[in-house]
Image: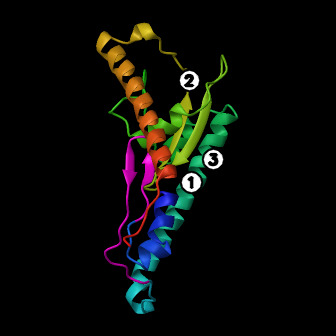
Amino acid sequence: ANPAVTTAAFSNEVLEEGLNSDLLQLDANRSVVIHILDHQLAEMRPLEEVSSEITVLLQIQAMQEQVETLGESFVSSLKSGANIDSLLEVQNLSWTSVEAVERSTTTINPAITDPVFSTPRPADGTTAAGGFQLGNGDYVVFELLTVQDGTAEDLNEGEAQNMRNFISQQGAANDFAGFMQGLEARAEIKGKD
């Protein structure tokens, strides 16, 4: 959750007084105002009611920790230069090899591609290995072999125009956000006399 949203949602004005929050900017293109319709206080539930849920959660947590430990050992082996194919085979796992992946690919989960694209470029003649756990508990181990820089010539005319439009829109959105912040800073709110 966005920290500003959480802070606003639990502020005295919004939670207790029933007022709307200030305008909260989530990113350059999205803003939100919060109004609480209903708030239920936290309460203790009887152990008998929640014991099965707790058992399942603890089992899931233990499995995720085991998966993470195993994944980290694979990454460590890769980083030391070892071939982990036999280690994967013992666990009934295998590599999924992908080539020429672009940032905008839709065939691979962005939760996987985003961290890989954030990995520093491997030095010439080397690879970059890493790993991370997904929200569902799966652990992704990757080995980045090469990075191919894109060029403006790689873009077709439609993509180039879309890029120019995007940059123009981002500039306009930033200008508008600055304008709105200036208006909010200078605004004076007066009550009805």
Q: Amino acid at mark 2?
A: Leu
Asked whether residue 97 is in view, the answer is no
Dot 3 amino acid type: Ser
Tell me which corner region of the image, top left, top right, bottom left or bottom right, holds residue 53: bottom left
Q: Which is more N-terminal, label 1 or label 3?
A: 1
Which residue shows up at 56% across the image and 54% down it? Answer: 68
Cβ–Cβ under 8 Å for marks 3 and 1: no
Q: Which residue is mark 3?
A: 73
Tags 2 and 1 touching, CB below 8 Å? no
Left or right of 77 in this view: 98: left
Which of discs 3 and 2 lies nearer the camera? The answer is 2
Position in image of residue 148 (x %, y %) = 51, 16
Please rate how many residues cluster around mark 3, counting C-alpha atoms within 10 Å: few if below 14, some from 14 to 19, many from 20.
some
Q: Residue at x 38, y 88 (%)?
A: 49
Q: Quadrant of residue 29?
A: top left
160 w.r.t. 71: above or below: above
Residue at disc 1, secondary structure: helix
Q: Which residues are magenta?
A: 21-41
The Cα–Cα distance between marks 2 and 1, rounded to whole angstroms, is 23 Å
SS class of the residue under badge 2? loop
The answer to whether 48 is drawn above or below residue 167 in the figure is: below
Which residue corresponds to the image point at 44% horizontal and 10% vertical from the top-left? 152
Q: Position of residue 126 (x, y in %)?
A: 65, 22
Asked whether residue 26 is drawn in magenta, I would say yes
Determine the secondary structure under disc 3: helix
Label 1 sits on what residue type? Glu
Task: Name the residue carrying label 1.
Answer: 68
Frontmost residue, 31 versus 138 = 31
Mark seen at residue 145? 2
Disc 3/disc 2 C-alpha distance (Å): 19 Å
